[in-house]
Image: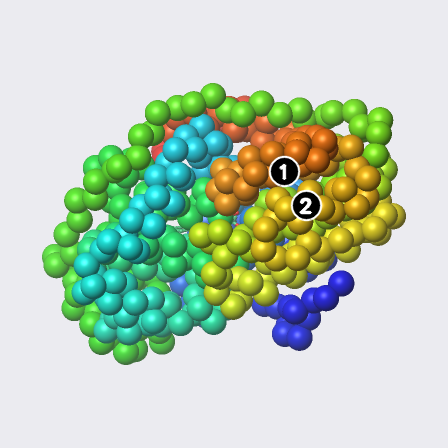
Amino acid sequence: MNDPGEAQFPPFPNSRATAENRLRTFLPGAARYAAHRNRVAPGHDGVSRLSPALRHRLILEEEVVAEVLSRHRFQAAEKFLQEVHWRTYWKGWLEFRPQVWRDYVRKIATWTTTAPGPLLERVEAVCRGTSGVAILDRFTRELIETGYLHNHARMWWAGYWIHVERLPWELGADFFHRHLLDADPASNTLGWRWVAGLQTPGKTYLPRRSNLERYCDPGWLADDTGLERLEDDVVEPARVEDTASVEIHSLPKYSTSPASPPGRFGFWLHEDDATLEIGAFRDWQPCAIAVGSTMTSGPFSSLGRQRRIHLSRVLCDGGDRAARHFRCPVDVLASGALAESLGNWALEHQLQEVVGYAPFVGPGSDAVSEVRETLSARGIRWTPVQRQWDAELFPFARAGFFPYWARICKRLGTGEDQERQLPGF
Ligand SMILES: Cc1cc2nc3c(=O)[nH]c(=O)nc-3n(C[C@H](O)[C@H](O)[C@H](O)COP(=O)(O)OP(=O)(O)OC[C@H]3O[C@@H](n4cnc5c(N)ncnc54)[C@H](O)[C@@H]3O)c2cc1C
């Protein structure tokens, strides 16, 4: 398959092999993670850098958790385990409240078309890395050039955008979503809402000079231009209005272990889950596999260069592994109208059914109704399947992280089912 990512050595995992390698390298450090995770320094050695792989399920959360627990006692690696479970928590939280995603998408369109010119000019300036605060501009360049930012840098950056620049959080989140290799509709949207004070009302995240000086590499702060705007007694929380309802809806119901279809069927592999060969489908025999992204058309199609390359490499890798495992043809769908391409591909292979992992709330779930209708118009059934991990854990994410984590502890058999201090990001 054509691989535009091949030319450059990827510093972040963009295939299952590089993800396994990254996990192996990081594993001994999982016990040191709690002490080092907040430090923002060249190389980002204190954190796993697994998110560009976990986001696309090149490697699964359950695999990472199992590997960590095979090497460390729960208590030693608890902080890292908690963080991995934050990903699932945010996904479950958003599955319960898909309207929060829809409201976010609507607000991006509204801001982009109706915001006053000077506001949009300031948005542009900050996104170009010309905010005038040297350290923030350094992070902007890092994001654009590498597609990654340390969690602490994401919090400072988002906090600066919201509480110092007083810009609409949705436009900042959209900028992240276009550039981060791990861009995830749940972690990103809800991470931004958390910094804005919308997830835990009354609790905002303020970017403060003292915090930057404590955790950021001194070399990166050598140029302190503009840092006076982040003085502890200068930054005040912005009042951000929540326009989304956080009412809880029931979770969509999917099968987790369906029987292999009796007729001709194929798989659809997309960016929300690039590992078809591990899980419910392992022993199935599809006639064909289609690789098709939900991000190549629509409002999220204009992606940053690194993100585009990463996405393409992830899908190539998922397709290659699926081709080897299932020994059937794999077609990479042309970018553009996904539903139409998928429908034509299914007809070409005379399929009666297309099966795949159900995309999550975000561009994936937005694309699904059109996919279902287009297939149905051709007499072909769309069957979404859910991983057992999601089916088990998403229901725990109805409320706050506290009770969720208590249930996870019980599930992991740690005996730590009492509520503990709320873990921060
Ligand atoms: C404003 C903002 C936007 C964010 N946008 C995204 C995003 O689009 N995609 C994304 O994957 N993460 C996002 N995060 C969460 C977090 O910053 C990244 O997951 C983390 O920095 C990834 O780097 P790592 O793999 O080295 O993490 P590590 O520190 O090594 O953590 C291990 C794993 O735990 C999970 N994790 C860690 N922190 C979080 C968190 N706060 N929320 C959810 N999962 C977490 C990730 O899967 C990560 O790979 C965002 C956070 C903020 C504050």
Foreground mark, 2 or 1, reads 1
Find the residue positioned furthest to the front.
377
Q: Is residue 407 left or right of residue 10?
A: left
Q: Quadrant of residue 326?
A: top right
Percent x, y for residue 243?
26, 37
Is residue 200 visible in the rendered image? The answer is yes
Q: Is residue 80 left or right of residue 247?
A: right
Identify the mark nearer the N-term, 2 or 1: 2
**Badge 2, how many Cα within 10 Å: few under 14, some, many 20+?**
many
Residue at 30% across, 35% down? 244
Identified by mark 1, the residue type is: Thr
Q: Which residue is mark 1?
A: 374
Q: Is residue 99 left or right of residue 207?
A: right
Determine whether 279 is above or below 163 in the image.
above
Identified by mark 2, the residue type is: Leu
Determine whether 27 is above or below 118 in the image.
above
